[in-house]
Amino acid sequence: MSPSDDFLKYLQYEKRCSKHTLTAYRTDLDQFIHYMSELSGAFDVNKVTQKDVRAWVVSLMDSGIAARSVNRKITALKSFFKYLMRENVLEVNPAQLIIKPKVAKKLPFFVSEENLNHLLDVGLFSSDFEGRRDKLIVSLLYGTGIRLSELKNLTDVNVDLNEFTIKVLGKRNKERIVPYPKSLRLVFEEYFEMRGDIAGKSQFLFLTSKGEQVYDKLIYRVVNKYLTMVTTISKRSPHVLRHSFATHLLNHGADLNAVKELLGHSNLSATQIYTHTSFDKLNQIYKQAHPRS
């Protein structure tokens, strides 16, 4: 049995790795062994050097393999050689000092202001209980940038109709006060009017037609349904409305620290991803407006 087979058995039975991880690691190791065999005619684990591993990583990057996949392959190699050191087959891990390539951050999906204004202003929602509820769900997610879980757990007492704010319980049980657009006052009132008899003794703001607290899949389906009417982007989730909220605020000159507080981020780095999208907008405006751009 080869050292790689021993390693995979070790992962399977002692580390209890998932089938997906085992399959990926097997493929990664087979690719490295094949690469080394082509170089030297036969694979000898004792002759692998740091230079060999680095050359393999460079070849992977040159062939266009995504940085995320390359990073997984490096992790597989590091784990493999670490196992061989544990088994006293090797004294040094030739992959230990290999630096993983940086993974480009995915820019967040967002819906344009025009499309969201069209959705909320044109009258695409029905006038029954579910239609009023769904309009408030979409309007509040976009108007405040709160998370799905935060919206789901809102109660009546969390809503201040006079101050136009909601009290949100975020991650790590951190409370924050978030303002909502004054235009939502009427949406709230219409929803409360329709909710009347359905609410019963429930403390939750958003309910199903049976008077129970809404659940994650229901909120996701609502958002997906209505965003499908106005956009063709591949992701149409509640989090896309959160992304849209942050992006549109920054596009209109909002302070980054203020957006951080509104979103309930614990550090600024989580908020800074939205500046990429906003910069694209600013760059476009600059090119259109500056006489020498």
Image: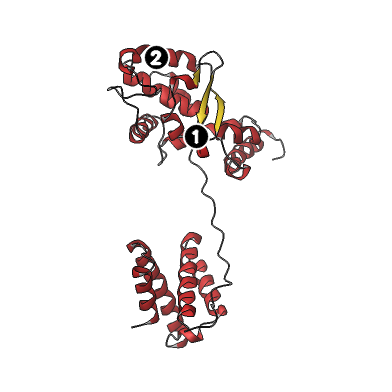
Q: What is the spatial separation of the Cα atoms under label 1 and label 2, in whole angstroms? A: 24 Å
Amino acid type at image mark 1: Arg
Q: SS of the residue at dot 1? A: helix
Q: What numbered label is drawn on residue 4? A: none
Q: Residues within 10 Å of mark 2 (few under 14, many from 20)?
A: some
Q: SS of the residue at dot 2? A: helix
**Quadrant showing the C terminus:** top right
Residue tagged by mark 2?
192
Query: In the image, residue 178 lies at what x, y percent?
Result: 55, 26
Q: Is residue 165 visible?
A: yes
Q: Is residue 180 left or right of residue 20?
A: right
Q: Residues within 10 Å of mark 1 (few under 14, many from 20)?
A: many
Question: 25 or 81: nearer the eye?
Answer: 81
First in residue order: circle 1 vs circle 2? 2
- The reply to whether the C-beta atoms of the residues labelled 1 and 2 are less than 8 Å apart is no
Residue furthest front as drawn: 201
Q: Is residue 64 visible?
A: no
**Quadrant showing the N terminus:** bottom left
Query: In the image, residue 220 lies at what x, y percent?
Result: 37, 34
Query: In the image, residue 75 lies at what x, y percent?
Result: 48, 67
Asked if residue 236 is positioned above or below residue 52 in the image, the reply reads above
Residue furthest bottom as drawn: 41
User: Which residue is depicted at the point 50% across and 72% down?
Assistant: 78
Query: In the image, residue 191 lies at what x, y percent?
Result: 39, 16
Question: 290 or 124: nearer the eye?
Answer: 124
The quadrant holding residue 201 is: top left
Residue tagged by mark 1?
242
Asked if residue 76 is positioned above or below residue 145 in the image, the reply reads below
Amino acid type at image mark 2: Phe
Asked if residue 63 is positioned above or below residue 233 in the image, the reply reads below
Mark nearer the viewer, 1 or 2: 2
